[in-house]
Amino acid sequence: MSATSAAALRQQAIAWLVESRSGAMTEHQRKALDRWRQADPAHEAAWSQVSGSLERVLQPLAPHTSSHASADAAVSALLQPDRRRRRIAGGALAFAGAALGGLVAHRFTPLPGLLADAHTATAERRSLELADGSRLLLDARSAIDIDLGADRRRVHLRQGALIAQVPAGSPFTVQTRHGQGQVPAAHGARFMVRLQEERTQVAALAQDVDLHTRLGAQSPLQAGASAWMDGAAISEALARAEAAAAWQSGMLAVDDWPLDSVVDALRPYRTGLLRVAPAASRLRVLGTFPLDDTDRALQALASSLPIRVTRYRGGWLTLIDAA
């Protein structure tokens, strides 16, 4: 089997797994999954690979012990300076304390999001209904501005991700700094938009979506597919739409991602700082991981990759390094 076909089968298996864990799978869909698994040994192998990774995640967590006692002591010293240092530092420590307080608050609720029309905190997903009947699901640490009028329906995604369930009406647009996904007039659709630092991902979950980059490139996105926009160009994404939107069910579906991308996806669900060392950042990852229990997700990564996960100060700082 070619690498391309193997990757395609993994994506199909991930999509089936997301559906089976969503809590909304019908008996008809279960039978369809059984038929898919039985149709070809390669299907069953892909299913075993993907679902097996999830079962490993669901195993009880082993007690954690840090092997970096000296580093932990150093962090402790920084966070708990002695009296002499406090006397010397004086106002500087007061300023640092205020900054630390701001950092802690930012880890719970992103400060830029407080100025948005709607936002979510760390580890929070939120559903809301707009005046036009559209429904939005915001991922953790997301922020949006809403602009509705007689002839326009526009949502500006400032950070994070959302899923839009759009009834027929005037054109509905979700815009980011890289471009926009738009549902044409008189069409209903369901689609996801995720904003990253250098690009935006759009996944068409039901019905097609039109893509427009900031610099004028255009392309239709067919239902079931996903694509990236970087401001200038549009490129196809390997992930199928349902896998890209697995976060709606509290899951992270990963197919050959670098570890630093996996860490980026876990950060919105973790209040503490999460850092990955350059030596470990490019390791490749395959599997499904629980977003609502990042400790368990990190344990699963440590059990399948040559990495060491070390937690300091009750989880406020977690470092991932090559083992």
Image: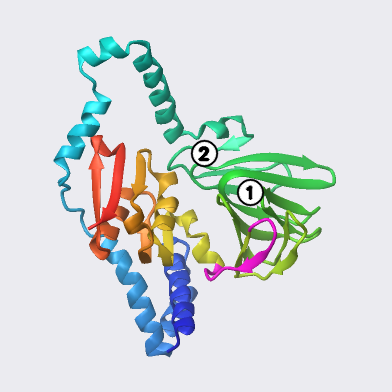
Magenta stretch: includes residue 4: no
Q: How crowded is mark 1: few (under 14 residues within 10 Å), some or many (20 or more)?
A: some
User: Measuring 73% from the left and 46% from the top, which residue is drawn there?
Assistant: 154
> For the stretch drawn in magenta, what is the main secondary structure?
loop
Observer-nearest of 254 and 256 = 256
Report helix, strand or loop for mark 1: strand
Q: Which residue lies furthest to the right in this view?
A: 151
Residue on which the image places disc 2 = 120
Which quadrant does the N terminus fall into? bottom left
Residue 277's disc is none
Observer-nearest of 67 and 222 = 67
Mark 1 is on which residue type?
Answer: Arg
Q: Residues within 10 Å of mark 2 (few under 14, many from 20)?
A: many
Residue on which the image places disc 1 = 135
State the image coordinates of residue 170 (x, y, percent, origin top left). 81, 53
Which quadrant does the C terminus fall into? bottom left
State the image coordinates of residue 141 (x, y, percent, origin top left). 50, 41
User: Measuring 15% from the left and 38% from the top, which residue is drawn there?
Assistant: 70
State the image coordinates of residue 303 (x, y, percent, origin top left). 23, 62
Q: Which residue lies furthest to the front in this view?
A: 88
Which mark sits nearer the N-terminus, 1 or 2? 2
Q: What segment carries the magenta color?
A: 230-240
Residue 251 visible within the image: no
